[in-house]
Image (spheres, rainbow, N blue to C red):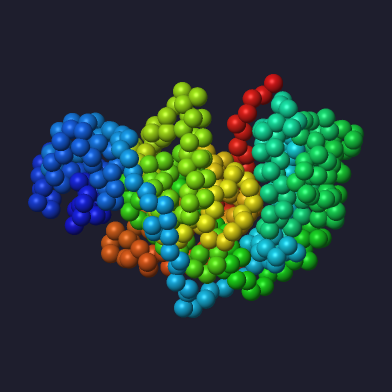
Amino acid sequence: MSLLRLHPDDDVAVVLTDLAAGASVDGLTLRDAVAAGHKVAVRAVAPGAPVRRYGQVIGVAAADIGPGDWVHTHNLTMSEADRAAEVGMDRRPLPAPVHPATWSGYRRADGRWGTRNTLAVLTSVNCSATVARRIADAFPVDALPEGVDDVVAYTHTGGCGGASDGDDIRLLQRTLAGYARHPNVAGVLIVGLGCEANQIPDWLAREGLTPGPALRTLSIQEAGGTLKAIEAGKSIVRDLIAVAAKARREPAPVSGLAVGLQCGGSDGWSGVTANPALGRAVDRLIAHGGSAMLSETPEIWGAEHLLLRRADPDTARRLMDRLAWWRDHAEANGMALNNNPSPGNLKGGLTTILEKSLGAVAKAGSAPLEDVIGYAQPLRKPGLTFMDSPGYDPCSATGQIASGANLIAFTTGRGSVFGSKPAPCLKIASNARLAGWMAEDVDVDASPVLDGESLDAMGARIFDRLLLLASGQPSASEALGIGDAEFVPWQRGAYL
């Protein structure tokens, strides 16, 4: 088999291997050379007519398309056609698992479960970034007591230059608070300069956080400068390590897992292998009572109808409100939501945002959409939640972790070196070439789906790997020490 047609209604099929112009495959003669992962027409499509993949419209023909033609940016363009969505029509519960699974985690005082046992050195402002890093660097992983996984400094570029009660500061405070109370964090040191707009006492009070043995604060100005603050911070972290070292793993229910769903560097295979296989794993997770978060709002545009069909009316309205905000936000900044596919996406065979979004939404499986929350807002319900965020992986994952994700599952087709802390990241490759070429960055190779392995079987494998990761098995990105620099809070306001 050289072509893969995903749905009987599809006008295009995906090429499985590089094919030359003139090649005869599955009854078609190719008019152009077509690279693996790209699309070829299986029947004629007139200009202006819709073009379908996944059984869904991915755009309209910009020129005459004949059988055997390569279909890409030269002859396929965006469609603004209405995507009918009967709210709730596909909303149905998942069947309970026959054999309930468990994993091994850290039970926290608030009832949540941690997949890692780390310490966080948070910064209220960029001015305290170097001091925070020097403090954390004094505690390398191999020098920590058994059971304490890491001491991580989370630095950023914000915290001042705007109103102390402005939207940007509030969003940063909510993100920092999410990390401070995260179940993978056993102790927190918050380091500030002292005169910043993001005053530590103010945001702790606003977020309902109280200093104590596991939550400490430090002002560089009050400590007497850089060197004195570093020494004071190191002393505090030693105390926090003693607190964290008391934690022990114990059997945990899958309902204690919350997985943030991400994709980056997507290609033409992502929507065929890695994303739908992850969706099957998400269905297993949610059937066990667990939670999953889909995000990257601009990257569901064009496929939102698939989520609306799984939502109740109130949840559907809130999702549409977020999409409307993004449309207005993009237009105000001279952009358009239909301009999202990156150069890497295009080179990998994706042509329009509709095509990219249909593949991206597949990560969320088939469970009902239970809630829509703002960026970094705490999870409120088990099951599938949509968290609003930009379509920028580090920023989106930062918000998911702040919302309570204790694992990240990340699919990629072109290749990604992303990793996250304190929630470890499982990377899933869409194709065998990537899985071999960037093997040290990949945890799961989903390409066997192209060789006949069912999506259900691959989904079961991904689910099992998530349980192992949650129980302490290092991910590829953890083994490489990736994640310290991937803390990227969303900044969307003005600086003065």
Establish if 316 lies above or below 124. Answer: below
* x then y, percent, for residue 49: 20, 37
- Quadrant (top left, top right, bottom left, bottom right) of the N terminus: bottom left
> In the rendered image, is residue 137 in sight?
no
In the image, what residue occupies the spot 83% across and 41% down?
Answer: 201
In the depicted view, which residue is nearer to us: 460 or 330?
330
Drawn side of residue 288 relative to residue 176, left or right: left
Quadrant assignment, res 200: top right
In the image, what residue occupies the spot 81% across and 44% down?
Answer: 205
Quadrant assignment, res 50: top left
In the depicted view, which residue is nearer to us: 46 or 193?
46
In the image, what residue occupies the spot 69% across and 54% down?
Answer: 182
- Quadrant (top left, top right, bottom left, bottom right) of the C terminus: top right
In the image, what residue occupies the spot 77% across and 43% down?
Answer: 206
> In the rendered image, is residue 357 in sight?
yes
Q: Residue furthest front?
A: 313
